[in-house]
Amino acid sequence: MKVFVTGATGFVGSAVVQELVANGHEVIGLTRGAAGAAKLKSQGAAARIGTLDQLDILRTAAAESEGVIHTAFIHGFGNMNLKTRLNLFAGALKGGVVQSFMRILGETETQAIDAMGKGLSGSGHPFVVTSGILMLPQGRISTEADSHVNNGPNRAFSESAALAFVPHNVRASVVRLPPSVHGKGDHGFIPQIIEAARKKGRSPYIGDGQNRWPTVHRVDAARLFRLALESGEAGAKYHAVAETVIAFREIAEIIGSKVGVPAVSCTQAEASKHFGFLSSFVGLDNPSSSEWTREKLGWIPKSNSLFEDLEKSDYFKAG
Ligand SMILES: NC(=O)c1ccc[n+]([C@@H]2O[C@H](COP(=O)([O-])OP(=O)(O)OC[C@H]3O[C@@H](n4cnc5c(N)ncnc54)[C@H](OP(=O)(O)O)[C@@H]3O)[C@@H](O)[C@H]2O)c1
């Protein structure tokens, strides 16, 4: 299949590209520049130069493909072009930085998904879009049938933008990723928690630390994206969850022992000082199941667990 992949040079997307190429697919990856194009070429993929706000490029690339996997996301200022930055500042002056930032994330994502969906409309081709597990209902094991809760930052907008194309004969589906997608090259929450422990001399968890996070290895997540592309159902929401339940305290303890600092209980207010913006997530209790996903797509996670990766990989080398 000729597959257009956004975020193709990223932590998750580059594993998706490798998985697709290894399984005989032809990959065209979106990237903003020459370095990304060279990386894609070295992986056996072609490059399409463009950004998430070049909607004509996205629509055309999707229309020329036989399937799309969307993993790109503007996580921060560095991912924004000048026009978007100016838009961010203008919004910040009116309603505050955080609100403006969230608006830009939502608008960029939904307009990009809309452009690719239009390119695919009427084709019956697959369109697999990335979402997240965090902010599904808390305090119980969430499933693929659950929707995000409204009172926090979540990726409901990614899901609704993608699934809006199901009635337009697009085989649109969603892959929800856990808060820790781990493996070589991880630059997500876990490295940031390690860095905070190093800098501040302790590895905290909130309260008794029994709040739970699910996890997945990037290679297993990539295999799920491929399976969703090849045989996912229109409208499905798949969970890339290898480990349903890990108490955050256990994560804090292993990080503490590796860094050589104590793992300690703290209050939400202390967590805000220690973790900064991450503090909104470290206390979430979001265990999640992938039973339905495994049954439907025959997905079996095979790679290292988070703790195996923390024991054996490069997570602590810089220290
Ligand atoms: N990593 C995790 O632990 C984790 C957990 C939950 C959910 N997720 C989600 O998984 C997806 C992938 O995350 P990731 O960690 O792999 O991201 P990443 O490593 O930061 O990669 C981001 C990718 O997006 C592309 N990109 C960034 N800004 C762009 C723009 N303005 N226009 C076009 N492309 C742009 C980059 O391409 P170029 O630099 O080549 O242009 C890069 O390939 C995201 O939706 C993320 O929210 C990740």
Image: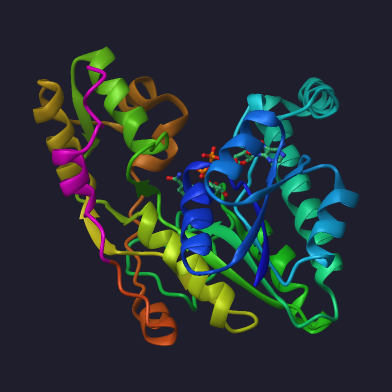
Nearest the eye: 136 or 168: 168
Instruction: Answer whether residue 9 is visible to the viewer in this image.
Output: no
Report the side of 61 relative to 208 (left or right). right
Instruction: Answer whether residue 191 is visible to the viewer in this image.
Output: yes
Residue placed at 30% from the left, 67% from the top? 301
Nearest the eye: 53 or 76: 53
Q: Which quadrant would the N terminus be assigned to in this image?
A: bottom right
Q: Which residues are magenta?
A: 302-319
Q: Label the magenta part by its dominant secondary structure.
A: loop
Report the side of 210 relative to 32 (left or right). left
Q: Which quadrant would the C terminus be assigned to in this image?
A: top left
Residue placed at 54% from the left, 63% from the top? 148
Report the side of 191 relative to 134 (left or right). left
Residue placed at 76% from the left, 66% from the top? 65
Position of residue 57 relative to residue 66, above or below, is: above
What x and y, as percent, mark residue 105? 70, 41
What x and y, as percent, mark residue 113? 75, 58
What x and y, as percent, mark residue 317? 22, 23
What x and y, as percent, mark residue 51? 77, 40
Nearest the eye: 80 or 271: 80
Q: Is residue 128 magenta?
A: no
